[in-house]
Image (cartoon, helix red, strand yellow):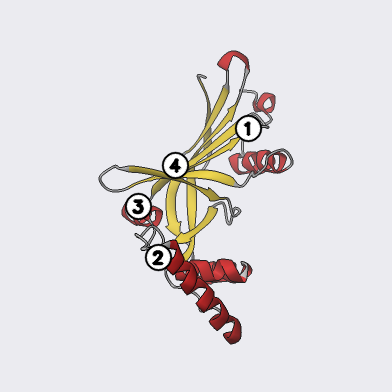
Amino acid sequence: MNLSLFNLTLEPFDNFQSWYLEAKNKEENADAFVLSTANLEGEPSARYLLHKGIHDKKFCFYSNYNSRKAKDIFENPRACMSFFWHRSGRQVRVSGNVEKMEEKLSREYFYSRSFESQLASALSNQSAPMSSKEEFMKDFNHKKELFKNKGKIEYPKNWGGFYLVPNKFEFFIYGEHRINDRIEFLRAENESWRVQLLYP
């Protein structure tokens, strides 16, 4: 297969980074992706998150560890990230197993965020029922003044990062008459990648 016809190489991480950088120049939000998970009963769930880079060939994202997505991951670590770049005419799907990020790196990222984002993450019991938005905002504004005087928000142990370790990539290029190009990279036992062309 001549991968250069699809602007691809034999290295899927390089391919993703090349397409991603092109999308950054064309799309409103190239970092947005859908994270799909399922619990032990097989009940699926999907939500939009933001791509936070690749570390040691692992895709990074962050969440509250008590959230629905985190509970799914702790029960069933298999997940899929789906990027849709409309103006570029491309999609990328990345599938694999999810691992919890080291606390040191999670903590570093937490403190790189804005003060308000830190506070919202520290106060939110993500995905749990909430009595009212007004009560949450009252608590938020109260704690905002309190922590401003202290100078630093304590890092919440129930918040941090995850890594998705890919074992499959699919690069999708839109074509005329729905004759799309789909190129799949599957991780082999020797850590190399097996490449195959899929029907549209």
Element assignment for label 1: loop
Labels 4, 3: front one: 3
Rendered location of residue 113, percent (x, y): 61, 66
- Residue ID for mark 4: 189
The x, y position of residue 44, in whole percent, is 35, 42
Local SS, label 4: loop
Callout 3: 10 Å neighbours few (<14), some, many (20+)?
many
Mark pair 4, 1: CA separation: 34 Å
Q: Nearer the viewer, mark 4 or mark 2?
A: 2
Q: Point out the tag, 4 or 2, that comes first from the N-terminus.
A: 2
54 lies above or below 94: below
The Cα–Cα distance between marks 4 and 3, rounded to whole angstroms, is 27 Å
Indicate the secondary structure of the residue bearing disc 2.
Answer: loop
* Amino acid type at image mark 2: Asn
Comparing marks 3 and 2, which lies closer to the viewer? 2
> Which label lies toward us, 1 or 2?
2
Which residue carries the number 2 mark? 125
Report the amino acid beneath label 1: His
Residue matched to label 3: 72
Q: Can you see residue 190?
A: no
> The residue under label 3 is which amino acid type?
Asp
Identify the residue at horizontal 65%, vertical 34% (top origin).
Answer: 9
Which numbered mark, 3 or 1, is in the foreground of this view? 1
Where 129 sits versus 31, above or below? below
Q: Label 4: few (<14), some or many (≥20) within 10 Å?
A: few
Residue on which disc 1 sits: 86
Mark toward the start of the polypeptide (4 vs 3)? 3
- Disc 1 crowd rating (10 Å Cα; few below 14, some 14-19, many 20+) is some
Question: Would you say 88 lies left or right of 105 here?
Answer: right
